Amino acid sequence: MLKTLKRILAYTRPYFAYFVMTILFAALGIALSLAVPIFIGEAVECCIGKGQVDFERLGRNAVLLAVIVLASTLFQWLMSLATNKLAFMTIRDLRKDVFSKLERVPLKYIDRRTKGELTSRVINDIEIISDGLLQGFAQFFSGVITIIGTLIFMMTINVRIALVVVILTPLSFFAASKITKMTHDSYMKQSLLRGRMVSLSEELAGSQKIVKAFVYDERAQERFGQINDEYGKIGARATFFSSMTNPTTRFVNGVIYAAVGLLGALGVIGYSPFIGTMTVGNLSSFLAYSNQYTKPFNEISGVFAELQNAVASAKRVFDVLDEEEVSDDSDKEALTECSGALSFDKVYFSYNPEVKLIQNFSLEVKPGERIAIVGPTGCGKSTIINLLLRFYDVDSGDITISGKSVSEITRDSLRSSFGMVLQETWIFTGTVAENISYGMPEATREQIIEAAKAVYAHGFIKRLPQGYDTVISDDSGLSQGQKQLICIARIMLMNPPMLILDEATSSIDLRTEHRIQKAFSKLMEGKTSFIIAHRLSTIKNSDTILVMKNGNIIEQGSHTSLIRAGGFYAKLYNSQFES
């Protein structure tokens, strides 16, 4: 816990000025509030005895008391302002670092976790840190100052009663510490379940068409209900233990207050030599200080309960920050000239060491060749693309581009040499023009329009309410085919030296597909191209067709030669035309 707290507090260092202001304003505000019982005691002294009320002195005390209360309130407000500024700016930096970290972790880290879990860590867990830790800092610090200040004032009034208060105080700490230990495990489990719940909610809410189509409603509710019930039980347990803290410490503080009142009353009437003599005004001040002294223990105990939840969330956030990053390649050579020559040399790779995938894979590609990759699902077609772009690194062997190993080339320059269109379309919230120019932000409007025309997207774009300035998103009502046309227009605009088309026309009607194939043919002139397709009729004009099975190339050649051979490719091709 201490290690986690130190890491969180390290984020506050750039805003040390707000930290100092928080302490300063807290000290001033509490010092003034501690002076209030003194004036209350003096006011009581002015009113003792029938017909002996000193109205002039009482009036002065009332004015001073009003000024002190107003000044104390002002400093408390300034303290809250500085604390909020400190908390919000610290959390802003922490959230920025976490999001930046997600951009630097290996792709396998993202692939092995759900979107909901990562979203929960970036948003929910960091908010809990803000509410439970940084916001509670001011409350904790104010409580500590109040305890020390009231103890000093009580000592000046009556040392012996003050010692009784000090002796009974550890009872409150003991009760709070025991309960805090019991809440820690519950909050850790609650934090984990919260991530699972967010992940499942996002999964089911984002796939409602599939849920409805497969009549999965009841099972979806059952899955959510199981996690929700477990979360409710753990949450109730955590809340039960944390809610015990305040009433337990209040009971102990009530006992202390009663003891002070009893002993002070005995001192006023002179019945206890041990206590000594006290005036009614002194007793009033002492009781007020006693109440102020015990009150922070309730607040601090509440902070400890929230602290458990905040630390549990902070651990999940720091787990992301501690994850291994993609190796820095700033010292590597940038790929400035790309001829399109490419080779795989005895490449071995698997996502899971226990499940073999690509083994002893070798391939030579000449500049400008059009390479089609076909095969059954799971044979390693898309994995070849992942290795080309270094989303994953090979286990052994090497991949070279223009005679240079991809491990010696910067990732940015490597990926900039490829234009990729995937089967899964991706549209971000922005204008149509911004979506098309995603890979080339400096493109002019004329270049954007030419790219759209080349892929036959200009027609439907002009029919949108604001044309190229229409704001669209993944849920804006565009058809899957229209989204894919925009994605293809991105690549047409970039005009990269190498292309990767992974089922690029799978969501487009046949008429438009024939048009786009012509556009692709023009785009691919002189460029090395990799085409992954299940619809084999679209790859007949490829220079070389690689037939993959279980991570290995089992056939290689042109469409005509493979058909004549009558092997695995011929069976795949003919099966698409069986009645």
Image (cartoon, grey):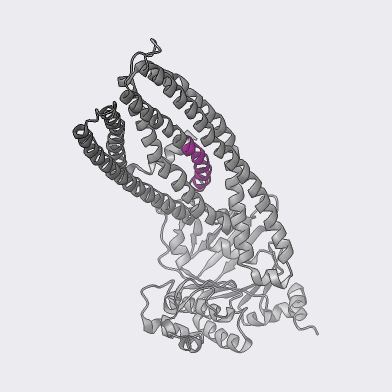
User: Residue 430 placed where, x, y %?
Assistant: 44, 74
456 over 22 or under it: above or below? below
Residue 371: quarter of image: bottom right
Q: Nearer the viewer, residue 2 or 259?
A: 259
Q: Is residue 315 left or right of residue 433?
A: right
Please name whichever residue, 186 or 162, is drawn nearer the observer in this view of the structure. 162
Above or below 504: residue 243: above
Quarter of the view holding residue 224: bottom right
In-image side of 157 versus 55 (left or right): right
Kindly tell me whether residue 555 is visible in this rendering: no
- Give the residue at the far right of this rendering: 579
Q: Which residues are magenta?
A: 301-322
User: Vertical placement of 206 versus 222: above or below?
Assistant: below
Residue 363, how many percent across, how many down? 61, 65
Using residue 291 as the reference point, say whether residue 237 is left or right of it: right
Q: Residue furthest top?
A: 273
| Label tally | 0
Q: Does the segment drawn in magenta span residue 312?
A: yes
Q: Is residue 512 magenta?
A: no
Which of the pair 144/33 is nearer the observer?
33
Expressed as whole percent of the image width and height from the top left, the position of residue 327 reads 47, 50
Q: Main secondary structure of the magenta part?
A: helix
Q: Quadrant of the C terminus?
A: bottom right
